Amino acid sequence: MINQLIQVIGDEALVFEEFLQLLDRQKEALVSNDTDRLNEVTELQQQKLLLSRDLNRRRERLIAALKETNAIEGDVTVTRLLEYADEDQSQRLSRLRDAILALNDRINEARNTNAMLLNRSREFISRTMTMLSRLHGPNRTYGRCGAPSEGAAVAVDRRI
């Protein structure tokens, strides 16, 4: 059963690596402003997330079975599993744990970079729209206390 768990965790690590590659492709699409490629990458990311959920469910079922079989109390961590694994399984589990932790750090870094790029793009769009709205001369509107105001209203949809 531990070998099955190692296989599932290995599959999860591969999905995380592929997701990291998709984040890199997403960054390239954001930088080049290629919306078609961005949509394609987003769809692939969603597929990887679904696959990751399935693998997570399989891993949870295997861990529950291991807990029952070995009468393990409390949470099951890789460190606790090492007690029930042979030498080869212990080494593979340790390597997978280290690989997944490293991938998690890299994924978080890439996601933060992409979020920053998206926010900068939104700010640029907002500034551009503000400048365009003032292009043909400001419309005089009334502000606080009925005083004339020199500004144009700009609406930006940030639900994306």
Image (cartoon, grey):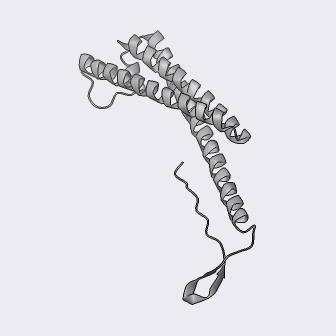
Question: Residue 92 location in percent, x, y?
Answer: 50, 15
Decide: is 31 above or below 54. below
Question: Residue 4 location in percent, x, y?
Answer: 39, 12
Lateral position of residue 131 relative to residue 76, left or right: right
User: Could you say which is closer to the camera, residue 70 or residue 118?
Assistant: 118
Lateral position of residue 90 relative to residue 121, left or right: left
Residue at the image point whose x is 68% and y is 36% from the top: 29
Residue at the image point whose x is 67% and y is 52% from the top: 120
Q: Is residue 26 visible?
A: no
Question: Residue 136 location in percent, x, y?
Answer: 75, 69
Q: Is residue 144 visible?
A: yes
Number of numbered discs overlaid on the protein picture: 0
User: Could you say which is closer to the camera, residue 157 or residue 50?
Assistant: 157
Question: Residue 53 location in percent, x, y?
Answer: 41, 28
- Which quadrant holds residue 37? top right
User: Could you say which is closer to the camera, residue 152 or residue 80?
Assistant: 152
Q: Quadrant of the N terminus?
A: top left
Residue at the image point whose x is 45% and y is 24% from the top: 51
- Which quadrant holds residue 72? top left
